[in-house]
Amino acid sequence: MELEHDVRTGRETRIGYADIPYLILTLLLVLVGLVMLFSASYASAIHDGLPPTYYFFRQSVFAAIGISAMLLVGRMNYQFWRVFAFWILGGAILLLIAVAIPGIGVSHNGARRWIRIGVEFQPSEFAKLGVVLSFSAMMSVFRDKMKTFRYGVLPFAAILAVIAVLLYLEPHMSATVIILLTGAAMMFLGGTRLRWFLLGAAAGILLVAVYLSTKGYAGDRIMAWRDPFLYPRDEGYQIIQSLYAIGSGGLFGLGLGRSRQKYLYLPEPENDYLFAIVCEELGLAGAFLVLLLFMLLVIRGYWIAMHARDRFGAMVAAGMTTLLALQVFLNIGVVTNFLPSTGISLPFFSYGGTALVLQLAEMGIVLSISRYGTQSETE
């Protein structure tokens, strides 16, 4: 047990230890994710003229950086993030604007979602972090005013609207959905009245209708989602191959490394559809164990939120956990064709260095909250 001087109260704060179950679950998911990424990616790497370990090596480097960041952030006082919450949000918004600047913004497959400044990354990942931290900071200040429109709806809706518009221009539907749902969940937990969510849902349905009518490719994805086998050569191709992979895995799978769909049948199996390879190689049993690890991590995250020593810590832990849970649910939903294809990656598994580092840093913030949460239990 350590003591740290609290500059806000002038008293010594008692610090416990980081939540060990949460740390172990996170490390297990990263380890399993790296193993499955290597298995899913080496065929694609060879086909592209790259070394078989190309994706695995790069992801391993980012995993090492992310774990180091997680451990470092986990040692910091989480109140640090209250001070810089709006700076992070403002920086994320500026980066989303910069995506439209030629020479900075980068396009892939018709979407301009990336920025290249030495390294290539998606500003939407920083926007997710900025929304969780800024919402938590405001909710800790507006604690007794969250049921009013002025404090409980207007500032949060304004932030979400700005980010949603910028993401719409890229376009980046998956990030828009995740950020809007995460923001709405945090507002609900923060105490916003239920009637505003009903109005928000009505507005959301209207916006989705407009989006589908103005973005032709999105409408095509909806049609392919309803029956992918009607579009076996274009929009339905990837989901068909994903379903083949899931179905051929059976109960216990074909065996690690023995997937057939990764041999250029399932496009980019190391990214959004990596879970289909998990199902094919490890079967229903292996996929269930992976989902069980995610479920335990989410439950533990909410447990940490419930035991946080103040409202800011509770909202940050709940927001980070909700963000993680939504991304897992939406990715699995897309891979199994339960939801239309939206390009959502699976945390700790899908290839992507910036996303992995930020996800692990976010886990570090939750670990920091768990360390400082011991004071309330002792008192």
Image: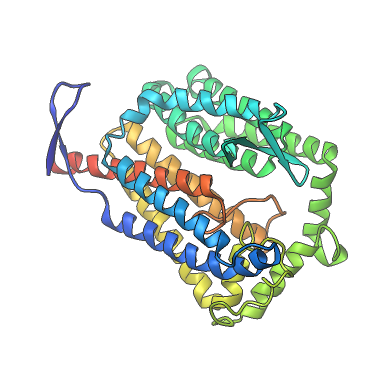
Left or right relative to 135: residue 378: left
Q: How many marks?
A: 0
Direction top: furthest residue: 150
Residue 157 appears in the figure: no
Q: Quadrant of residue 206?
A: top right
Report x, y in % for residue 137: 40, 26
Q: Tell me: residue 47, above or below residue 93.
A: below
Residue toward you, 258 or 224? 258
Q: Tell me what residue is drawn at x 15 percent, y 21 percent.
A: 10
Q: Quadrant of the N terminus?
A: top left
Left or right relative to 356: residue 377: left
Q: Tell me what residue is drawn at x 23 percent, y 39 percent.
A: 372
Residue toward you, 187 or 352? 352
**Rendering colour mode:** rainbow
Q: Tell me: residue 353, above or below residue 31.
A: above
Report x, y in % for residue 156: 53, 25
Q: Tell me what residue is drawn at x 70 percent, y 28 percent.
A: 100
Left or right relative to 218: residue 184: left
Residue toward you, 301 or 277? 277
Q: Tell me: residue 168, above or below residue 336.
A: above
Q: Quadrant of the C terminus?
A: top left
Q: Tell me what residue is drawn at x 70 percent, y 26 percent.
A: 101
Report x, y in % for residue 32: 45, 66
Residue 86 appears in the figure: yes
Q: Quadrant of residue 209?
A: top right
Report x, y in % for residue 59: 50, 56
Q: Quadrant of residue 305?
A: top left
